[in-house]
Amino acid sequence: MHAFSRSLARAVKNARDKMNLTQEQVGELVDTNTRTISSIENGKSNTRMNILYPLVRVLRIDPNEIFYPETVADSSVKHQLRALIENCSDEEAAALLTTSESVLRVLRKQNAGKIEEKKSLSPLG
């Protein structure tokens, strides 16, 4: 099994489970059969674009899970944050961007201070 087949299989199965859908229901939604969905989830399918595209969209799979699985953290918090942002208007997203940048600056400054504090308390520091 190719690495991309494993990541696709994992992403489809996880997304389908999260949405509480059966393989048959997913097959109906993407206009294919249960056997095709099963083959994809088992990494035994060389999936064509006419199936892959609607599958990713219907199951709301982040394409990075398939193409760059090593960069996708298993953080449900990050996934929730992405989903929140995807459902924002441009105006809301702009406000969140400004706020997020400010919050990150403060958090990173606090974290840097803690690291410096630990260094100064270290017998080697």
Image: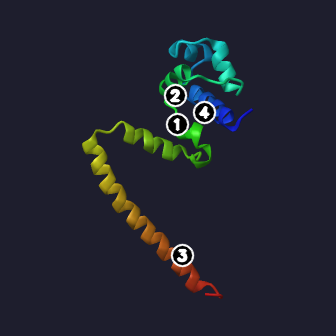
How many angstroms separate mark 4 from mark 3 (CA)? 37 Å
Q: CA distance from mark 1 to mark 3?
A: 35 Å
Sequence-first disc among 1 and 2: 2
Amino acid beneath label 3: Ile
Q: Are marks 1 and 2 in contact (CB under 8 Å)?
A: yes
- SS of the residue under disc 3: helix
Task: Determine the secondary structure under disc 4.
Answer: helix
Quarter assignment of residue 3: top right
Q: Is residue 46 above or below residue 29?
A: below
Of badges 3 and 2, nearer the viewer stands 2
* Three-letter amino acid code of the residue under disc 2: Val
Label 2: element kind: helix
The disc label shown at residue 115, or none? 3
How crowded pointer 4 is (Cα within 10 Å; few <14, some 14-19, many 20+) is rated as many
The answer to which of marks 4 and 3 sits earlier in the sequence is 4
Report x, y in % for residue 58. Answer: 49, 23
**Amino acid identity at mark 1:** Pro
Q: Which residue is mark 1?
A: 63
- Residue corresponding to mark 4: 11
**Tag in front: 1 or 3:** 1
Label 1 CA crowd tier, 10 Å (few <14, some 14–19, many 20+): some
The kind of residue on which mark 4 rests is Ala
Q: CA distance from mark 4 to mark 1?
A: 9 Å
Q: Secondary structure at mark 1?
A: helix
- Residue 56 - label: 2
Q: CA distance from mark 3 to mark 2?
A: 42 Å
